[in-house]
Every structure is written in structure tokens, then in C-alpha cells.
Image (cartoon, helix red, strand yellow):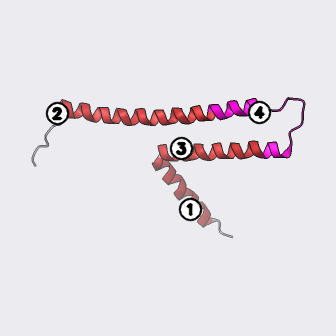
Amino acid sequence: MPEREKESPEQLERLGRAEGAERVERTERLRRVEQAQQARRAERIGQAEPVGQPETDTERRRRRAQFLRDLTEARELRDRVQPRRAKAARLRHAMRMRTFRW
């Protein structure tokens, strides 16, 4: 069996930089998402009603819709960051749905 050529230090360095750049890009995206969420929270805090007044139905629905959007965004982000885990979760969910048919 022919021996495989070893990669040169320059090639290893380039590979390391590419992996490092990928990690930096991922952390930058996560940081931007977190900043956007903090900005939304700050907006909501600024729009909050005084403590003594009861909450109206439309305000509760607006807050609930915002929460559900944030939750969906967080799930999508988790699925993009951990694709193998997301695929396994989809397969488990499909099995559950097949098992308990009405």
C-alpha cells in the first residue's frame, strides 16, 4: 500500500484558518441574533404598561405572537447549528406520529 503524503505545515495552517474562520462566522451570526433579541426585549420593556393597569387582550396576544416568533427563530437557529440532532429529532417525531394514528 503506498504511503499517503503528509500535509505540509502551510496546508495545515490554511486548513486551521478556514476552520477558525468558519467558527468565527458562526459566533458572529449568533452574536447578531442575540443582539437583535436584546433590542426587541428593550423595545418591549419601553412599551410596557404601568404596573397597576390590567393587560388588554390585544396586548397579551401581541406579546404571545412575539414570543412564538422568537421561539421559532431559536429553534431554526438550533437546527442550523446542529443539523444531525435536528434530523434525529425529525425522525423521532415522524415515528411518534406514525405510531399513534387515530
Question: Quadrant of residue 63 in the image?
Answer: top right
Q: Distance between the Cα atoms at labels 3 and 2?
A: 36 Å
Residue 49 position within the rendered picture, expressed as x and y whole percent measured from the top left:
83, 32
> Looking at the image, is mark 1 or mark 2 earlier in the sequence?
2
Q: Comparing marks 4 and 3, which lies closer to the viewer?
A: 4
Question: Quadrant of residue 97 in the image?
Answer: bottom right
Q: List the residue tagged with mark 1.
A: 95
Q: What amino acid type should be assigned to the residue bearing mark 1?
A: Met
Q: List the residue tagged with mark 2.
A: 8
Q: Comparing marks 3 and 2, which lies closer to the viewer?
A: 3
Dot 2 falls on a residue whose secondary structure is: loop
Q: Relative to residue 22, is residue 91 drawn left or right? A: right
Q: Distance between the Cα atoms at labels 2 and 4?
A: 59 Å
> Looking at the image, is mark 3 or mark 2 earlier in the sequence?
2
Question: Residue at point 86% right, 42% down?
Answer: 56
Specify the segment rendered in magenta.
Answer: 38-61
> Looking at the image, is mark 1 or mark 3 earlier in the sequence?
3
At label 4, counting other C-alpha atoms closer than 10 Å, the crowd grade (few under 14, some 14-19, many 20 or more) is few
Q: Comparing marks 1 and 3, which lies closer to the viewer?
A: 3
Question: Residue at point 86% right, 29% down?
Answer: 51
Q: Relative to residue 27, is residue 46 drawn left or right? A: right
Q: Main secondary structure of the magenta part?
A: helix
Depth check: give the residue in front, 11 or 82.
11
Dot 1 falls on a residue whose secondary structure is: helix
> Looking at the image, is mark 2 or mark 4 earlier in the sequence?
2
At label 2, counting other C-alpha atoms closer than 10 Å, the crowd grade (few under 14, some 14-19, many 20 or more) is few
Q: Distance between the Cα atoms at labels 1 and 2?
A: 48 Å
Depth check: give the residue in front, 77 or 88.
77
- Residue 63 lies, with reference to residue 47, above or below; the image says below
Q: What amino acid type should be assigned to the residue bearing mark 4?
A: Gln
